[in-house]
Image (cartoon, rainbow, N blue to C red):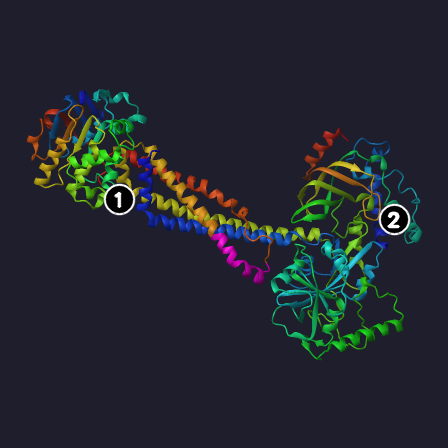
Amino acid sequence: MGINIQNLSFGFDKPNGFSFKISDLSLVTGQTYVLLGPSGSGKSTLLNLLSGILRPNSGLIEIAGQNLLGVTAAHMDRFRGENIGFIFQTLNLIPWLSAHDNIALALAFAPGRRARLNGAVSDNVNALAQSMQIEERLLAQPAGQLSIGQQQRVAAARALIGAPSVILADEPSSALDAANTKLFFELLIGSLDTTRQTLLVVSHDTRAIDLFDHTLMVDDIIENRGNYE
Amino acid sequence: MNSLSLNLLLRSLHDRRFSLSLIVLALAAAVALFISVQNIQRMTKDGFENTIANVDLVVAARGSDIQVLLSAVFGIGSTNSLMAAQSVRDIADLPEMAWHVPVSLGDSHKGFRVIGTTDAIFAHVLADGDKRYRFNKLLSLAVGADVAARLNYSVGDRIVLQHGLGDYGAAHDDLSFEVERILQRTSTPFDRAIFIPLQASEAIHRGWRGGRRMIALKPEHVDANERHKEAERHLKGHKHSYDHENEYHNDHDDDHDDEDSETEHMHGPSGIDAVFFGLKDQRSIIQVQREVAAYEAESLMAVIPGITLSRIWQIIGLVDRGFIAINILIIGLVLLSMVAMTVLSADNRRREMSILRALGAAPRLLVGMLTLEALFISISALVLGVVFAGGLSLVAQDILAVQFGLMSDQGFMLSDAYLALYLVPTALLANIFPAIRLYRNSINDGIMVRR
Amino acid sequence: MRLTVIFFAFWLLVGSVISPSARAETPKFVTDWAHLLPEGLYDFFPEDMATSLWVDPVFQSKIAEAERKIRPELNKLPIVLPGYMVPLKYKGNMTTEFLLVPSAGQCIHVPPPPINQTIFVSLQQPTRIRTYGEPLIVEGRVLTNGQVTEYAETGYRIDADSIVDFSFDALDERIEQLGGR
């Protein structure tokens, strides 16, 4: 199982306090999911719970078969680095680092992903870059100088390298225009290793949903009250 | 740390190279300043450490013991009043005295002081290698090691002496002296002095009144005066034999000079600034001191050098501590700016930090990177600071020596820098505050910083 | 000199009043300035002193002689003695050889100490020079053989093991370590 959530509850006990519940969410390995819903509907909370930043009050939350509650705080960062590849809405990259180094950076704190590579890091980076249609000449440039579309694709390559079990994307296309959006998702989905990776995209953008295997609605999944932020 | 993280760190430094350079430069300047001041302090101390080891008492007209030592031994300032030659004879006649060296100060040559004295100074006070040296004639001159080095003198050179302590005095150009000996290094202030026979010092001043030259003297006059006085002495049946220990013969009754004692800071024939004494039994030192104080013909005092030097040291100690306090302040200030810069940059790098956390970097790893940065900055600053200080001391050596009389056997020593080593752990300690801040920020921000 | 004679009475008083019993038999250690004076040193002083006797040069020379007498039997004894320092060999603010005297010499109202109460102290480790306001305690061994000056005078010397700033507690402590007064 890529992601498995059962009877998850998170929130504060106070009346009119924040509460967040998911009774059942099972995402299968090799499948691609898009979770639709407006901003503020609990998507951020879900992502924070999935990445181990927030701890649920009760329930099961499993990534790549590992119960997150069983991972100590000390190891959480490492676990996250090894098993989850993130793509944020914007500002994904370290601007003064080259695109190449940004992609390779994902391996700096995740030796498991590093081990999964065949051959030299550079070769793998180049291969992924090709797969995401990032021109070779851009790889050596500081990431801050790339266009937004190029940056997002670099971010995707970084999330993909070393094939972590789960790819989580938080509104990755909201800064892109329609054409770039379609291209982005096509390339992303096309570059997945479907034998071991699950893709979950959280978005309010309906433009490219037909590329995904499954479309989920936030209201169906999350029982949300109040505002965490 | 693997090569990818190291690469990250290096590239991060490179990206911020401008502000980092500024901080490193500022710290390096503070370190250089610190080291230079240590250096000067040490040289000053060295200058005061080795002095008149064999001298048991310094006798002078009653006044300030510190002033007497400073002027007679260190050549700093001058004495207020003089001793009469008769007093010198009487004190020297005390049974407890083993030897004595009278000194007459006030002349100078190109910034170095000229001391009128007797051969006894070579036998008892200066270097062992010069023990047997004696002045050969009236206008002979023995030069201290540093003087010879700095002014490039050799035996046989002829030089002219000035009146007064500064360079502004009128020169006695009617009388020139011959350099007879370059003295061995003593590592005391006497290395920076020039020695002439006592009676030469008196003879020079014979033509002066109130600081101005009245009569142009020629060498023949001087020698003639000496011969005349010799004759007079024989006639008067002077008891003192003309031996080398007592060559300060000065005669109030000599009618060739009608000087009066208006010549306070100008050393006419009637005055000795101070006399160095060696005792037969050092245990009598306090008793002799009392006897000198009780001498009725003139108000005198006997200074025990060790005691007075210790007082001078206490004064220097105060200044020392002042210096150290300032130094610490300077380094503290610069470290503070380093901390400020780190905090500022850490704030700017919050986005960066959250990206790294998303990639699996634990907060303590980020703190570790910050610490490595602080280490890098402080070590660079230290090395650069030492280089600056070394260069500075090379450039300034001449100025220090000529203007301030600060000379040391070794100019710049690495040992001056040892205190600066404390900069590194201090910088790391100073880093704790921004590190904690960073840690907490990255925990709170998680991976969702939207800046 | 006349002054020494005139002020001599002071030292006579000091010498004779302080622990006369300690001077009777050979002590095992020295903890007092009076211990250093031979017994009956000033016995040649008559009961009633005439002023004419003070100024008599023969009398004066007897006193001067008496002031140089030491007790050879004290050789090599452990010694703990408080006093004041007159530095002889020094470098900077540190000294390795000094004179130990019983009173701060610079005050003119106090007479200078006699020769047999002026002790050469030498140290292996340099110690800070103490000025006249800072009394100290010397701990070591007292020596009476060997010459003390180039001119072959005998006198007391101390080979010092430790120098500490004076305090009554410190003094008592050290004397106790020697075995009590």
Q: Residue furthest bottom?
A: B215
The residue tagged 2 is C64
Rendered location of residue B144, percent (x, y)? 67, 61
The reply, left or right, for residue C129 in relation to residue A114 is: right
Is B54 within the magenta? Answer: no
Magenta portion: prevailing SS class = helix
Q: Residue at the spot x=84%, y=46% of the render?
A: C152
The residue stretch that appears in magenta:
B388-405
Q: Chain of mark 1?
A: A
The reply, left or right, for residue A78 in relation to residue B415 is: left
Three-letter code, disc 1: Trp
Which label sits in the foreground, 2 or 1?
A: 1
Nearest the eye: C102 or C16: C102
The residue tagged 1 is A96
Among the 4 quarters of the image, the one containing residue A88: top left
Rendered location of residue A107, percent (x, y)? 27, 32
Quadrant of the drawing holding the N terminus of chain C: bottom right
Nearest the eye: A110 or B349: A110
Instruction: Establish whether labels 2 and 1 are both on one chain.
Output: no
Rendered location of residue C79, percent (x, y)? 76, 35
